[in-house]
Amino acid sequence: MPRFEQQRHKQPAPLKVPRGLIVACAPLRSNINLSRIVRTAGCCGVRQVICCGTAKIIEKISRDAVDEENESAVEIRVHRTLAPSLAALRRQGYRLVGLEQTTASENLHTFEFERRTVLVVGNERLGLAEEILAQLDHVVEIPVYGLPHAYNVATAAAMALYEFCRQFPNG
């Protein structure tokens, strides 16, 4: 049987090409959730997170993901509202994919991402506004097998980020 030894702070796996994924967050109620999303995005090699409203990143939670001296840090862009940013990203050729429970949501487990994707994450209580849903190309949801009826926003974002990385392991 192999002997396992913990490796703390193992170096990140190199990507062959930069990640083509951007995370865009509707105004969130909790800066803790936002900071967890930023940390996960950083671990996944995502280079940009768009936030709205009075977003504040808690560095103790996000850790090195937003360290300006770190060349692979996540760039945080804060905007008043999300819709204009999504429209601009669509013009740049990104596919807009919401993470939400809707009547036409696709299962995250079988959804095929495109490399240039914006993952749009909704508010903890209100989800994604109708104005934002109308802009999206696709909406994915994560099956829930018990109660409560939905995952925490940071947990759901982490699951979707993992699935994107699983489909594009080299960037």
Image (spheres, helix red, strand yellow):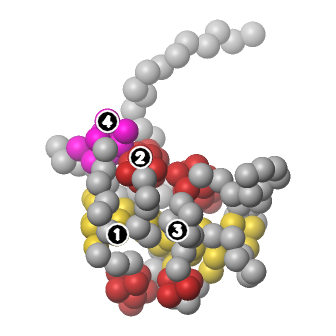
Give the mark, 1 or 3, whose residue is nearer the N terminus: 1
Q: Are marks 4 and 2 in contact (CB under 8 Å)?
A: no
Residue type, label 4: Lys
Residue 60 in view of the camera: yes
Q: Work out whether residue 101 or residue 171 is closer to the camera in this orientation and state it.
A: 101
In the rendered structure, the answer to whether residue 171 lies left or right of residue 82 reads right
Q: Is residue 94 above or below residue 6?
A: below
- The residue carrying mark 4 is 60
Contact, mark 4 vs mark 1 (Cβ under 8 Å): no
Are circles 1 and 3 on residues that touch, CB within 8 Å?
no
Q: How many marks?
A: 4
Q: Residue at x 32, y 68 (%)?
A: 53
Give the mark nearer the N terminus: 4 vs 2: 2
Q: Is residue 31 above or below residue 127?
A: above
Report the Cα–Cα distance between label 1 and label 2. Answer: 14 Å
Q: Looking at the picture, does residue 90 appear above or below residue 145?
A: below
Coordinates of residue 28 in the picture (x, y in percent): 43, 62
Disc ID at residue 122: 3
Between label 4 and label 2, give the one nearer the viewer: 2
Q: Which residue is mark 2?
A: 32
Nearest to N terminus: mark 4 or mark 1 = 1
Decide which of 10, 75 is in the foreground and name it. Answer: 75
Q: Which residue is mark 1?
A: 52
Stretch in magenta: 59-67
4 and 3 marks in contact (CB < 8 Å)? no
The amino acid sitting under disc 3 is Gly
Disc 1 from disc 3: Cα separation = 11 Å
Q: Could you classify mark 4 by the number of other residues whose Cα lies within 10 Å: few (under 14), some (14-19), or many (20 or more)?
A: few
User: What secondary structure is marked by label 1?
Assistant: strand
